[in-house]
């Protein structure tokens, strides 16, 4: 049954379900503004994959860039610039986990637009793919 305007009980249940999903998936689910100056939401998977706290990302939304492998950093920053133009992205890069290990990340992002076609947010998912890359 779909929620109707003013049906706060159904909306609250839908929000609870979404939170349950995003807080229990292994992937990192994120929502940010197009310039990445504000992190709207980051799932707890970030702490497992990056080894850093969600709070650190809320405090400094670009802090994840510091963990990107130097050989990949310029390319990733270039891809992030596509957000300013409302483009989707899909890329892979390496990070240094807080424990010092190198991990491969597959990160995808998609623009969300308002009724005027302006990009208001980006949503995305990042998945650790280290084992797959090692098998390749």
Image (cartoon, rainbow, N blue to C red):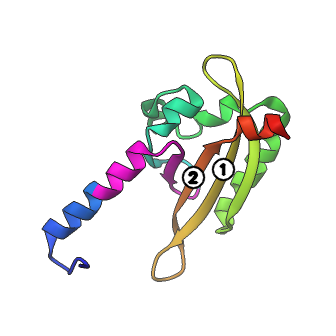
Q: Position of residue 126 (x, y in %)?
A: 60, 47
Q: Assess whether residue 23 is covered by the magenta stretch.
A: yes
Q: Position of residue 25 (x, y in %)?
A: 46, 46
Residues at marks 2 and 1, CA–CA distance in whole angstroms? 6 Å
Q: Is residue 4 above or below residue 12?
A: below
The magenta span reads 17-34
| Residue 96, picture quadrant | top right
Answer with left or right where residue 36 lies relative to residue 19. right
Say the numbered circle drawn on residue 84. Answer: none
Dots 2, 1 in contact, CB < 8 A:
yes
Residue sitting farthest toward the front:
135
Circle 2 sits on which residue? 125
Residue 102 vs residue 117, the one in the foreground: 102
* Residue at the image point whose x is 68% and y is 17% from the top: 100
Q: Assess whether residue 27 is covered by the magenta stretch.
A: yes
Answer with left or right where residue 109 lies relative to residue 134. left
**Quarter of the figure with the C terminus:** top right
Q: Secondary structure at mark 1?
A: strand
């Amino acid at each position: 049954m779909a929620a109707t305007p003013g049906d706060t009980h159904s909306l609250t249940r839908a929000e609870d379900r979404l939170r349950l999903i995003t807080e229990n998936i292994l992937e990192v689910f994120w929502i940010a503004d197009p310039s990445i100056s504000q992190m709207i939401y980051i799932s707890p998977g970030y702490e497992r994959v990056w080894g850093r706290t969600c709070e650190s990302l809320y405090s400094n939304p670009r802090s994840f860039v510091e963990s990107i492998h130097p050989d990949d950093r310029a390319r990733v920053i270039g891809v992030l610039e596509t957000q300013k133009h409302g483009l989707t992205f899909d890329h892979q890069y390496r990070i240094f986990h807080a424990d010092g290990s190198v991990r491969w990340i597959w990160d995808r992002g998609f623009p969300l637009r308002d009724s005027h076609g302006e990009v208001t947010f980006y949503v995305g998912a990042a998945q650790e793919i280290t084992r797959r890359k090692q098998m390749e």
